[in-house]
Image (tube, grey):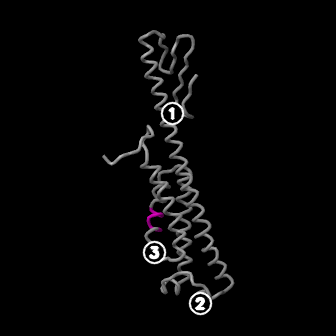
Amino acid sequence: MVRSGRGQGLVIQIHLGILDNRSGAYPCNYGAMSGANSLLSGIVNDQHSVKALQTRRRQYRWAGTLLLAQGILMEGLVFVGLIVLLAIGVPQEVISERADVFALPYLQENLYLMMAMSGIFAALRILGAIGLLRNRLWGLGLSLINCVVTLTLMIFLLPAGIADGVLSGTALVLMLFARLGRDAEGQPRLLT
């Protein structure tokens, strides 16, 4: 008995000269053997497509995990820090004087606003990562937008933007490889 992938619906049994599939039973003579060979070659192609699907799924999982870690650790914790600083009554000027977070003076002067914006990015990035990990198309779309926006803004957020760029860039490449890299047979997709 040969089975192809979970949920693929193709089960072929070869037993004592009878080839049986879900569409009916065929006697195993010379004419049916060519049909059996084409079915068996279909199984090989089906196994390639299952392997390509598993690779694509693994790439999406890695990208989702990177985006989730980035959203929680790099952006979510900054927003939690803002809430703590506001709760204990620390003025923004004290933080701006003692911490050089951004190279641009405008961003450095508005540090609390940047920390609040980080919370918005965290929520969107975590939501997109969860959608991606749950194999939802909207999660892919939201994550692609998040990565592109992050890569665009990282220039202005130096030096902290370098880590954002590395994580978002890696996740973007993984998502693009998963979506556009290979076809159902496992062959690379070409432009022409």
- Asked if residue 67 is positioned above or below residue 116 in the image, the reply reads above
Q: Residue at x 59, y 90 (%)?
A: 97
Instruction: Please name the amino acid that badge 3 sits on.
Output: Ile
**Disc 2, disc 1: CB below 8 Å?**
no
The residue closer to the viewer here, 59 or 120, is 59
Q: Residue at x 47, y 59 (%)?
A: 172
Query: N-terminal of the two: label 2 or label 1?
Result: 1
According to the picture, the residue beneath numbered tag 1 turns out to be 47
Looking at the rendered structure, which numbered label has been put on residue 97? 2
Point out the stretch of residues depicted in magenta.
145-150
Query: N-terminal of the two: label 1 or label 3?
Result: 1
Q: Residue at x 41, y 44 (%)?
A: 188
Please indicate whether residue 68 sits to the left or right of residue 152 in the image. Answer: right
The residue closer to the viewer here, 114 or 175, is 175
Alpha carbons under labels 2 and 1: distance apart: 61 Å
According to the picture, the residue beneath numbered tag 3 turns out to be 155
Q: Position of residue 41 (x, y in %)?
A: 45, 26
- Helix, strand, or loop for circle 2? helix
Q: Is residue 66 magenta?
A: no
Instruction: Please name the amino acid that badge 1 sits on.
Output: Gln
Q: Position of residue 88 (x, y in %)?
A: 69, 84
Q: Residues within 10 Å of mark 1 (few under 14, many from 20)?
A: some
